[in-house]
Image (cartoon, rainbow, N blue to C red):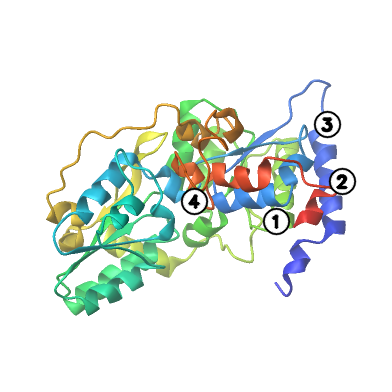
Amino acid sequence: MKYLDEFRDKRLAKGLVDKICSLSGEGQAGTPAPTFMEVCGTHTVAILRSGIKELLKGRVNMLSGPGCPVCVTATSDLDKTIALTKIDQVILTTFGDMLKVPGSFSSLQKERAEGYDIRIVYSCLDALKIAEENLDKTIIFLAIGFETTAPTIASSIISAHKEGLNNFFILSVHKLIPPAMKALLDMGEVNLDGFICPGHVSAIIGSLPYQFIAQDYKIPCVITGFEPLDVLQAMYMLLMQKKKGESKVEIQYSRGVPQQGNPKAMELMDEVFEVCDARWRGLGIIGSSGLKLKERYERFDAEKNFNIQVEESKEHPECRCGEILRGIIEPAQCKLFAKICTPEYPVGPCMVSSEGTCAAYYKWGQTPLVGSDPLGGV
C-alpha cells in the first residue's frame, strides 16, 4: 500500500458496486437479496461510515455479528472485575473502552469515582510496567480481546515470569472468533450466504481456522481489509462464489493476512494459554471459545489467586445487545437505542465501545448520508 486513497478510489468503487448489483440481481424475480455477516467491529464501522450499507440496500443485506470484544464480555466477568478492584492494595488496569460497560450493579467508571484505583492502559505491557514500579501493590490486568490481543498479553506473562514478579495478575476473559461463528450457525437464527471474516484476527490465525465453515456449512468466507474497496471487493468475491456454487475461504486482505497467519504470535499464545469454554454475552457458554493460563503460569491468574465473591449477574431487562450481537435485530429495533441508551449514558455494552454495533449505528447509521454518493463521505 502506497497511499490510503488507493483504497478509496470512487471510480473503482463504482465499478465494484455495478458488479455487485449485477450479481445480486441475477436469478428469478423475487429472489431475496443475499445476506452477509461481518464479524468485526472495525468492519461494521467501515460499512456504515462509508455508506456501503445504505448504498447496497435491497441488493445485499449486511448483518453485524459478535465482533466487538468489549460487547461480548459477559456481565458476570465484569462483576468479577469490579469485585477485584475492592481488594486492599489492588490497582486494576484495563483498556479504556471497559470503563463505561455496565455490570449488574455498577461499572468500573463508577467504582473509580468512588476512589478505587482503576487505571487505563493501552497495552498489557503498560500494566506490567505499573507492576514493576509498584512492588508494594497488587496489579491486575483485565485481559479482554480476541486472538488479536492475546499474543501481546502472553508476551507480558512470559516477561513477568522471567522477572519473577509476584504482584502481577490477569483476569483472562479472552474470546476466540471461529467457535463463536460456529455457535451462530448452529443456533440457526439467521440464514447467511457468506461471512466477511475479520482482518485483525486473521492476521494472527490465518485462513485455515475458518475452513470448517466452508466445508461443513457450505458458506463462503472472505477475509477482508478495512477500507471501502476492501469491503466491496469482499462482497463481490462472496457473490462470485455463490454464482459458481462454491464454498471456500478466500483472502481479499492479502496485504495483511498470509494463509498461515503469524506463527510467532500463535507460538506465544500456545506457550501461555490453553483453550477453555467461555461465556459470551448474548450467546451463552461456547465450548473451546476462550483462553485460560496454563498450569505453568497459574500464579498470574487473578481468578485462581483471589477469592472473588459476586452476586448472581443481572441484565437490563430492556437491553437487546444479545440479539444485536447475534445479528437478529439492528440497533434501531431496540426501544432504548438513541433515546435512553446513548454513548454518553450507555445501557448496554454495544453502545460503549467505538466498535460496538450500537455506537457505530448511532454515529454513522441513523440518517442517510447527504448527497447521492455515499462513498464521498469517506
Q: Position of residue 114 (x, y in %)?
A: 27, 54
Which residue, given by chain and number where applicable, does mark 4 sit on? 353
Which residue, given by chain and number where applicable, does mark 3 sit on? 26
Q: Visible in this render: residue 222? A: no
Q: Are marks 4 and 2 in contact (CB under 8 Å)?
A: no
Which is nearer the N-term, disc 4 or disc 2?
Answer: 4
Q: CA distance from mark 3 to mark 4?
A: 38 Å
Which residue, given by chain and number where applicable, does mark 1 sit on? 230
Residue 345's place in the image compared with 184, above or below, is below
Farthest front residue? 114
Which residue, given by chain and number where applicable, does mark 2 sit on? 372
Quarter holding the C terminus is bottom right
Q: Nearer the viewer, mark 3 or mark 1?
A: 1
Question: What amino acid type is highlighted by mark number 1?
Answer: Asp
Packing grade of label 3 (10 A; few <14, some 14-19, many >=20) is: few
Which is nearer the N-term, disc 2 or disc 1?
Answer: 1
Q: CA distance from mark 2 to mark 1?
A: 21 Å
